Image: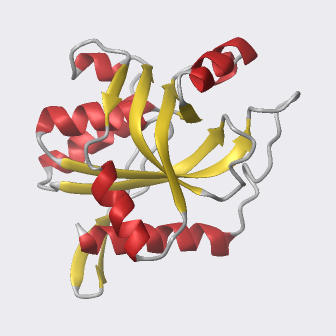
Amino acid sequence: MVACVDIPVYKINYEGTDIAVYCTTVGGPAAGGLLEEMIAKGCRKFVFFGSCGVLNRDIAAKSLIVPTAAYRDEGMSYHYAPPSEYIDVPTAPRFAKILAELELPHVCGKTWTTDAIYRETRANMEKRKADGCLTVEMECASIMAVAQFRGVEAYQFLYAADSLDEVEWDARTLGSLPQSQREQYLRIALEIAVSV
């Protein structure tokens, strides 16, 4: 039996620009599949955002992070891009410039995209951290691979939630972010959408 989920797509007008807004799902395959559907509907520019775990405890909860490349520890990207350890995020410099113009503090760096949330072990975290990854999340590599394969622009930012860089995992704000903060991230995404 196959279960289908309808994902609502809302049309809003933000500062004179019509924007389609939808809530993507967790995980690279689902997010990549929805991206394919939106491309098929005619969308050509995308702004994605979501929470991430930090691999450096000095990155404060709620901080903005712009991924510059994603370590491909998931499966979907390999169906869209030739094998490599990382996939670049070519839109990162433009995204970071817009954030700077909006006077929004942020950091730029590599991220670790993984399918296996329960295998974010200390050893794996230390490897990715040593390789320069600032964060861990579940969609970036997949989204970038689909976008590049289909020739569309995808912009991404993350906000720091939990920390893996502790003796024991620290949930920090994961799952407890107030609605007002979520709305701030949405407003940032809308500002980026009208700027690209």
Quadrant where the N terminus sits is top left
Please identify the quadrant where the C terminus is shown.
bottom left
Residue 195 x %, y %: 26, 72
Find residue 173 and report its horizontal and vertical position in percent. Answer: 76, 54
Q: Residue at x 42, y 67 (%)?
A: 99
Viewer-proximal residue, 176 or 122? 122
Give the residue at x 70% y 12%. 123
- Left or right of 59? Residue 134 is left
In the current view of this chain or complex, which residue is farthest to the bottom? 16
Q: Is residue 177 above or below residue 69?
A: below
Residue 32 position, x and y percent, is 32, 35
Q: Would residue 141 be found to the left or right of residue 178 on screen?
A: left
Classify 46 as above or below 89.
Answer: below
Residue at 29% in and 87% down = 15
Q: Is residue 189 left or right of residue 162?
A: left
Residue 120 visible in the shown view: no
The x and y percentages for residue 170 are: 83, 39
